[in-house]
Amino acid sequence: MVGYGVGPLFLSPISEVPFIGRTAPYIICLLLFCALQLPTAACNHIAPFLVLRFLAGFVGSPPLATGGASLADIFYPNKLPYAMGIYGVSASAAPSLAPVVAAFAIQETGDWTWPFWEMFFASLFTLVLLSFSLPETSKDTILLRKAARLRKITGNDKLRALSEIQQAHLSVSEALSDALIRPITMTFTEPIIIAVNLYNGLIYAVMYSFFKSFPLVYGEGGYGWNLGVSSLPFLGLVVGEGLGVGGYALWNWYVF
């Protein structure tokens, strides 16, 4: 969770750099996330296990912040709330479904490493799918590449994208530094961002405390349910999230 929380500060801003775009960070980070599942599944000591889990959270974090930007690239403002609602539910329902899938896998196999093999196969499938189907959505990156193609076709070196003109005085390192420093500065100086971050932190703290408390209540120490069945109460979170985004969509359609 530390890696998942810190990662977007460093990995998401680079998607705003025109010569990088959004697709490359998604694919590269997903490749690293997929690869990290293999040593994690084979790990038998707590120290390297914690390091591997931190790195997996770190490189798996870009969709947490960049996903909203990608949707904003694609959808008109009046349709964006619905897409953001579905995106938000997918990001919060996955941690609720994961304990159910993992618990039954461990119960049936007797092997605690099975959840990491499940993540490996799921992320590998997603990596292959997105490598061939995920388009670039950043308008600055699209126009930058279009300008480069037109210069090559026409031989006219004066053709420039707006982002090239605006960043003509910056080197590659300066452009990257500017993209990385701005969100970190805003995180600690903008009151509304501080407030939203603290609220999100509280929500995550509450939700992830369930992962520790639910097994104590419903498992062998409480109601005595087996490992798989004691994970089923997590599905209540999915139901609540679905009702929440459904109500929001109705309000957005009929009121807003």
Image (cartoon, rainbow, N blue to C red):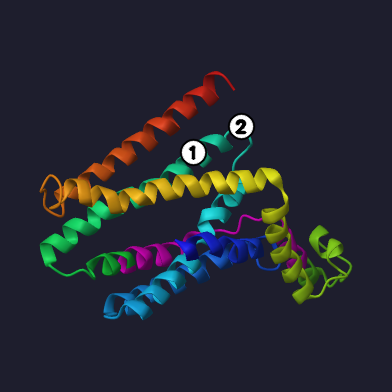
Q: Quadrant of residue 50?
A: bottom left
**Most common SS among magenta residues:** helix
Where residue 20 appears, as percent x and y from the top left, is: 66, 68
Q: Residue 227 at what x, y percent from top left?
A: 15, 55
Which residue is at a point 22% across and 68% down the rendered structure image?
A: 114
State how many labels appear: 2
Q: Which residue does the numbered mark 2 point to in the structure image?
A: 78
Q: At 33% from the left edge and 40% from the top edge, which residue is drawn? A: 237
Residue closer to the observer: 78 or 196: 196
Magenta segment: does it hold 223?
Answer: no
Dot 1: element: helix
Instruction: Report the span colored magenta.
Output: 120-149
Compute the Cα span from label 1 to label 2: 13 Å
Residue at mark 1 = 85
Check the image and report above or below for 193 versus 19.
Answer: above
Reading the chain from its start, which is encountered first: label 1 or label 2? 2
- Which amino acid lies under the numbered mark 2 shown in the image of this protein? Asn
**Marks 1, 2: nearer the viewer:** 1
Does 253 sit left or right of 233 as displayed? right
Residue nearest the viewer, comparing 126 with 89? 89
**Does 19 appear above or below 202?**
below
- Check disc 1: other Cα within 10 Å, few if <14, some if 14-19, many if 20+: some
